[in-house]
Image: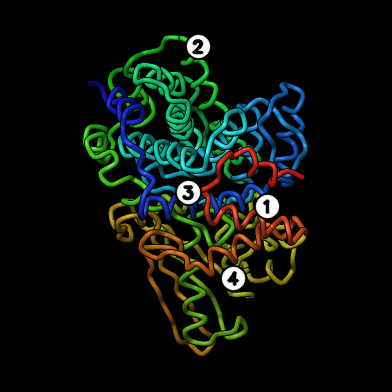
Amino acid sequence: MSITDEIATWVAESETNITGEALRLARNAMIDIVGCMIAGANDEATSRARKAIVDLSSGSARLVGSEVSLAAPHAALVNGTAAHALDFDDNYHPTAGHATAVLAPAIFALADEHSIDGTMLLDSYIAGLEAMTVIGNGVNLAHYELGWHSTSTIGGMGVAAAAARLCKFDMETTTRAISLAFSMASGSKIQFGTMAKPLHSGIAAMNGLLAARYAEAGITAASEPLEGIWSFKDLYGGNGEQGFAEGAKIMGKPTALERYGLKVKIHPCCASVHTAVDALVDLMNEHDLQVDEIKSVETVVNKISYDNLKFNDPKTEMEARFSMHYCIAVALLRKRLILDDFEKFAVQDSKIRALYPKITMTKTSEDNPLPTATNGREPAETRVILKNGQTLSKFLQHPKGVLQNPLSEKEMWSKFDDCVSCIGDAERVATIRNKLESFEDIADFREFTKLLTT
């Protein structure tokens, strides 16, 4: 069988994998992304996406934070934009991108059109991650370093697989869905720091659902879109690290979610700053430092992080999320980063901007990069030079939130509370939280999505 057929066969025919650690990690992923969608529902990028698309369809798929319901693909676009709008959603190592912000809005929208329970939804989520893992490992890091925003390119194919699982497609229809999603794969990292970046998540969620619908309607497509001449790997990737064959052989053994986990963010900004910020906060806490004791901060990162952090003097909250200077400055002042730090007024704070001259970001040479580790693609070294002449340094490979350095239950729910503080209805928040704590027991998911509307 071709690689795509192997993926499609697993998606269509494998047993449900919602048990044990896979269940716990998938449930926690839903807690995290629901918080992110609620927090991002009224972001400017989401509001504009909603305005652009609201008159294109009507349907039963609900928009988070709104009374509007649309056809599932269009709801997935808006909710996918909301999920990624604040860059607070998880990263996924194999794709070098964001996973849950693409998958969850799509399968939530499908669940609004059908009678789906929580276990079925989690099962389709895991299937989408499995497909994304094989595809991502087959082309990365070459694909990402070429400039593709893999959240958008690989994400759509993952959604097609998740939708196929949820809708119980056979292997042939699932193959067509993945192939058709490849035909819609696009999105460049040039959009980082703009509203187009979160829109990419929504576009991928929408395109994956459209691809599934096209496949179900019988539209034919190439039987092997991933490998060979003019394929996804040929055009978008070049030489991958593991290749497709190895990844396909180990699908579900155990699940990719158990093998890789998710990079659950503790800071609402680009993952490329996280290890540097974590190291700075650790040093300040370990040595009981205050900002007025510090002469300068030097951060050293590899090319992948350096290229993503384009804004040394950010002018907008979008740019601030991709600025080492801004994130380090905020951490110097407050020893943390929260959603309020990325509001328009915060980015113009003179106290923050006054710290920029103290901060430098240096890129390692490509022949002598900082060492990486399993599930730790963006290491950083942070050096704090004190006014008394002392230099403190810390090197981190794993940011807070990854499988090797996970959030505690308290940290997970603290982040959720920060995200849902915009609701202002304690009783509704408590009900949402109770449902999320036993996500797999939700009998009809439509009852849950009602709680996410206004």
Q: Is residue 51 left or right of residue 230?
A: right
Name the disc covering residue 307, or none: 3
Tell me the distance, in whole angstroms, between the alpha carbons under discs 1 and 2. Answer: 36 Å
Residue density around tag 4, few if under 14, some if 14–19, many if 20 or more, within 10 Å? some
Percent across and percent down for residue 329 are 61, 69
Residue density around tag 2, few if under 14, some if 14–19, many if 20 or more, within 10 Å? few
Percent across and percent down for residue 109 are 60, 33
* Residue tagged 2: 217
Q: Amino acid at mark 3?
A: Asp
Name the front one of labels 4 and 1.
Answer: 1
Tell me the distance, in whole angstroms, between the alpha carbons under discs 1 and 3. Answer: 27 Å
Name the disc covering residue 39, or none: 1
Under circle 4, the secondary element is loop
450 or 105, nearer to the observer = 450
Name the front one of labels 4 and 2.
Answer: 2
Residue at image position (66%, 40%) is 195
Residue at image position (53%, 68%) is 411
Tell me the distance, in whole angstroms, between the alpha carbons under discs 4 and 3. Answer: 24 Å
Query: In this view of the protein, can residue 372 be seen by the observer?
Result: yes
